Amino acid sequence: MPLDPQAAAQLRLQETLGLPPIQEQTPEQVRQAAEEAASTMTGPAADVLVEDSQIAGIAVRIFEPHGASELPVLIWFHGGGWVLGSVRTHDRPCRALAHRAHCRVVSVDYRLAPEHRFPAALEDAWAVTGAVLAESRPVAVGGDSSGGNLAAVVALRARDRGLPLRLQILIYPVTDCDFNRPSYLAYASGYGLTRDGMRWFWRQYLGEQPWDHPEACPLRAPIVSGVAPALVMVCEYDPLHDEGLAYADRLREAGVEVEVVEQKGMIHGFFRFRNGGEIDRTFLAYDQCAAALRKTLF
């Protein structure tokens, strides 16, 4: 279907900012831009309890509905190509998920590349997940983009260690490093996330390490059976569209319960408010995630 009008408006808004392409900036510059954008985002934010804390020595931000106790937990890994993003840039979606699913959300401030390359972010994600699972309450993991990558790999690790995850929520996840898939070629530029930008993110994250490591590319994991059920959400106008569907297909073929949500007409990054604007489809996506969480965690 045609590009969603609200998504198109967001792309035009980004153009007015006049920022150079990500691959022409330094990690510090792209981080600063992301943090500044988060500070100017408008729109309703869910009223939940918020606490900055640490779990397993890793900084986290915890979101809880008012008047609740002993809640199941969603552990969230933010997107940003493993280079940028924080608990601050993803504060609003985590608030929304805690409110709509009536669960505790633990947002992980994992280490960023290139200062801390693979597997540093994954080790932080796993440390928090292992500590929360030890509390013996229902646990799901989730993330958007590179955060979806971390969630998928954490789900594989949990399976290998016999730890019971209830659900993995993968929002337009990075699952592979193949830049020649049809969606990479069709949406290489002009839709926010670009093919060249993704190459840059991968260079920052892996450096000289093999890019096809199965804990960097979960699509290349030898065995994906036995992992937690998955909600996989992909966007039509997104370079990562095809690899997200490919991972969902691989899970399903391995006997994993999978729900696929295709966001027609939508662009990468819509799960967050973008530079002061709103996209109605974002709120629908929150509801779809919340429904999956209530179904599996309660």
Image (spheres, rainbow, N blue to C red):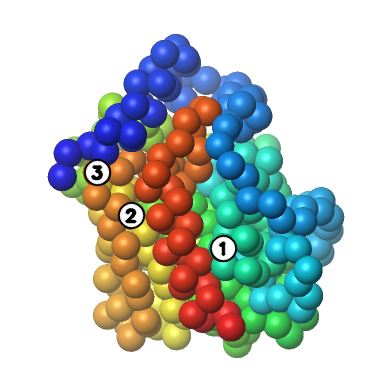
Name the residue rendered at 27%, 33% in the picture: 5
- Residue 86 location (% of width, % of height): 66, 42
Amino acid type at circle 3 is: Gly
- Residue 214 location (% of width, % of height): 45, 64
Residue count near mark 1 (Cα–Cα under 10 Å), binned few <14, some 14–19, many ≥20: some
Give the vertical position of 265 relative to 17 (above or below): below
- Where disc 3 sits, the SS reads strand
- Where disc 2 sits, the SS reads strand
Pointer 1 residue: 100
- Residue 92 location (% of width, % of height): 61, 46
Label of residue 207 in the image: none
Give the vertical position of 120 relative to 190 (above or below): below
Query: Which quadrant, please, contains the N terminus?
Result: top left
Residue 117 visible? The answer is: no
Chain-order first, disc 2 or disc 3:
2
Label of residue 234 in the image: 2
Chain-order first, disc 1 or disc 3:
1
Between the residue at mark 1 and the residue at mark 3, the CA separation in whole angstroms equals 24 Å
Name the residue rendered at 81%, 53% in the picture: 51
Label of residue 265 in the image: 3
Q: Are marks 2 and 3 in contact (CB under 8 Å)?
A: no
Question: Is 140 situated left or right of 53 in this image?
Answer: left
